[in-house]
Amino acid sequence: MKTHQLTRKDIDKIKAEIEYRKLELRPELIDAVKIAREQGDLSENFEYYAAKREKNKNEGRIRALERMLKFAVEIKEESAGGGAGIGDRIKISFDADGFTDEYTLVTTVGTDTLNNCISIESPLGRALRGRKPGDKVSVKLEDGSGFGVTVIDIIK
């Protein structure tokens, strides 16, 4: 099973979400299913199926979060040696075409590719973690291919 590198803040955030989902959301969703079931014929009861689907999505999310915690490895936010660490914004240049972009290193909990927040467990995140401005980095992809980047700047 794959481990998840998480900070203490991430672990606390996950525990709080699990507690909320179990103690507050679960009873509400169970009640919604019960109320919808009482409305009559289940074969044509959209409210029942919608309530049941929401309850099942909540249970699935609880299981996923508990599994993430079970296989979590706690890490420190900062990187040794003053290089790029969690929460740092890194400006890089892609060696092949000179295109530049900025990425923020985060744990899997904070991954948001639409906002260029990449996991330290992704190929690019692994390659950039601990690097300093001027470092040339080879990024290896899972299919065996790869590409090169140069770290331009780190915004702490």
Image: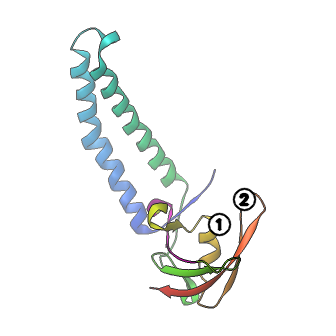
Please say if 98 is above or below 5: below
Earlier residue among tags 2 and 1: 1
Residue at the disc numbered 2: 142
Please say if 140 is above or below 98: above
Quadrant housing residue 42: top left
Residue at the disc numbered 1: 123
Farthest residue toward the right? 144
Please say if 74 is above or below 30: below
Which stretch did the figure color magenta? 100-110
Quadrant housing residue 73: bottom right
Depth check: give the residue in front, 8 or 143: 143
Give how far across and how far down residue 26 sits, in percent.
Answer: 29, 37
Give how far across and how far down residue 40 sits, in percent.
Answer: 23, 10
Q: Residue at the spot x=58%, y=81% of the render?
A: 92
Q: Secondary structure at mark 1?
A: helix
Give how far across and how far down residue 134 sits, in percent.
Answer: 63, 91
Residue kind at label 1, given as amino acid type: Pro
Q: Is residue 108 magenta?
A: yes
Quadrant housing residue 45: top left
